[in-house]
Every structure is written in C-alpha cells, then in structure tokens.
Image (tube, rainbow, N blue to C red):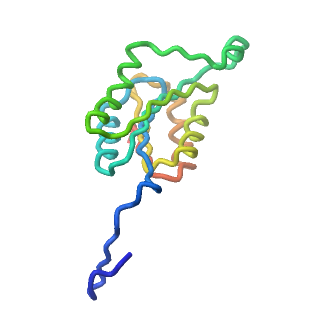
Amino acid sequence: MRSTGDIGVTAVGRSSRSDARPVMLATLDTPFDPRASELAVDSALESGQRLLVVNVSSVPIMPASMLMGYAYLESEELAEALRAPAELAASFDLPVELLRVASPHPADALLELVEERTPALVVLGPDMSMVRARLYRKAARKLRERAICLVWLADD
C-alpha cells in the first residue's frame, strides 16, 4: 500500500491477474435459484473474474457405476438451466467454465473442488424446492466449516 498524504488514507491497487480468484456458482443436480445466479454473475462481473458454474451430482457406488467410471446422465432441461448463468456471463465477455462432478460423496467432492480452484466466493445456490434437504445441509455445513473463502447459501 502507498500513502496518499498525511491524513492516513491509503490506496490499494487492483489485484494482478496472477492472483485472481474466480467466483464459483454451484448446485447439487438441480437448476439454480435465480437469486444465486444473479449474485454469482454480478460478483464475477464486478470483480472482473471468471465464473465457474458447477453441477455436483450424487452417483451411487454400484458395480455397474464403478465399471463405467461413475457415469452420469443429465437431462436436457437441467443442462439448459445450468447453461443459462454461463451464457449470461459470457454475454458480458467474462471467461466461464462449466464443470460437472459426479461422486458418491457430492458434499466432499464440492469441498475438494473449492480447495483446488480457490475461489474468492462460492455461491451454493440450488433450487431449494428440488434439492434433497439432507444433501444440501451436509454440503452447506462443510462449506461453512472448511472453505477458506466467502460463502453464500441459498437458504440464508
């Protein structure tokens, strides 16, 4: 920081691109809550950072899914709903990544992705009328307790 006079005010420069941290918009195999989508896209736009749009789905541990590498099939309606915030962000020339994660432990997989990608903000925003309550509570609790970034939760 540099001083801007003798009144005790300091100026802080913008962060360089090398330490830029994305905004992560995540859901649990449901469409996004519209408030969550808006918050994540606005935050990415205001900060000038990329948007990570993440769908984490639960895949049971079964012999067939083990052989197929945790295969996951997403409905076309869900795929379109998940693309909507990504397309909105891209319309503002923001870099966007769409990620699909299939795991027998979706809450742990989401936390692992947060640790790998080190976002500045995680917006966990599934449509609360469609998400399994127990799965949402588990993911929200893990993020609250262990994520080292800002976290916004749909039920707040």
Q: What residue appears at the point 39 percent right and 60 percent down from the top-left corner?
A: 15
- Of the 4 image quadrants, the one containing the C terminus is top left
Q: What residue appears at the point 29 percent right and 49 percent down from the top-left corner?
A: 46
Q: What residue appears at the point 28 percent right and 88 percent down from the top-left corner?
A: 6
**Spot occupied by residue 120 in the image (x, y as percentages of width and height):** 44, 51
Image-quadrant location for residue 134: top right
Which of 130 and 25 lies nearest the eye of the viewer? Answer: 25
Q: Is residue 7 left or right of residue 66?
A: left
**Spot occupied by residue 148 in the image (x, y as percentages of width and height):** 53, 53
**Spot occupied by residue 5 in the image (x, y as percentages of width and height):** 26, 85
Which of 31 and 93 lies nearest the eye of the viewer? Answer: 93
Question: Disc count in the image?
Answer: 0
Q: What residue appears at the point 32 percent right and 26 percent down from the top-left corner?
A: 84
**Spot occupied by residue 75 in the image (x, y as percentages of width and height):** 44, 13
- Of the 4 image quadrants, the one containing the N terminus is bottom left
Image-quadrant location for residue 11: bottom left
Q: Residue furthest bottom?
A: 6
Q: Is residue 64 left or right of residue 76?
A: right
